[in-house]
Amino acid sequence: MHYSRPMRVFLIHGMARSPVSMALLAARLRKAGHKTHLFGYFVTRETLQDIAERLVRRVAKALASDGQDARCEPYAIVGHSLGNVIARLASPGLPPGLASMVMIAPPNRPAIAARWLVDNAVYRVLTRDAGQKLADPEFFERLPAPFVPTLVIAGTVGLKASWLPFEGRPNDGVVALEETHLEGATTLEVEGIHTFLMNRRDVFEAVHGFLETGHLEVPEPVVRAG
């Protein structure tokens, strides 16, 4: 499959991970002709708002580094898990040129797992502000929605035992399928688990195709719009 519109892509990892977790996807995107940037953060050191503001500065700096022409070029954001919440929070302040977003395993609604753990002392210490926000319905009500074409990629092979927080509902082991849905976005369901979705070859193909064309091009997708 050939695409003709490579662009600059900012990749944002999930909570308790590092930029290394997005390195394979970044390498594949670079091989396909895109220019990639890995963005890192630590939820134990910064609030979500602080991280989002730093992302805005990072994008602006990267676009400015190549001069005026680069600032006029389209760019995209690809996030995993909490990285998508950060991208949404940052979106109103991002420089002009954002062309599309890809959300891999995103919590787009209050997370069942976070609500289950929100009062746990260890969870509170390890996740700080981010962990509390993930369980807060009011936070998600205020969270800006993407204003560009958006693809959601959701895993479906997490355990479905009735005694788990998901109570038998489809999930990827961390995020329930229903929590990934976002009005106006296209959802691609894949048989994968949360932690490693970004490393799958079929996920790369979907990401690459969406960045280049603005719509999903896979042979037999399970797709849900809205």
Image (spheres, rainbow, N blue to C red):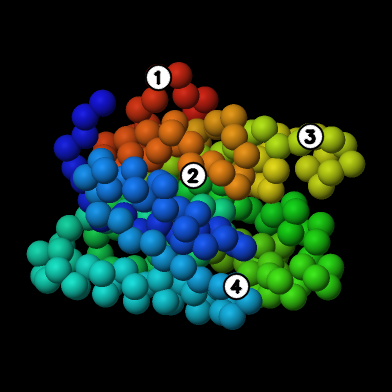
Tell me if label 3 and label 2 are in contact, CB under 8 Å.
no
Residue named by callout 4:
43
State how far apart marks 2 and 4 are (Cα): 20 Å
Q: Nearer the viewer, residue 149 or 54?
A: 54
Residue drawn at 76 percent across, 72 percent down: 124
Amino acid type at mark 4? Val
Residue 112 picture location, percent across and down: 75, 52
Residue farthest top in this picture:
220
Left/right placement of residue 208 relative to residue 80 reads left
Q: Which residue is mark 1?
A: 219
Could you say which is closer to the camera, residue 211 or residue 192? 192
Binning the other alpha carbons within 10 Å of mark 3 as few (below 14), some (14 to 19) or many (20 upward) gives: some
Residue found at x 57% / y 60%: 17
User: Eyeballing the image, is 62 above or below 109?
Assistant: below
Q: CA distance from mark 2 to mark 1?
A: 19 Å
The tag earlier along the polypeptide, 1 or 3, is 3
Cα distance between the residues tagged 3 and 2: 22 Å
**Are circles 2 and 1 on residues that touch, CB within 8 Å?**
no
Q: Which residue is mark 3?
A: 160
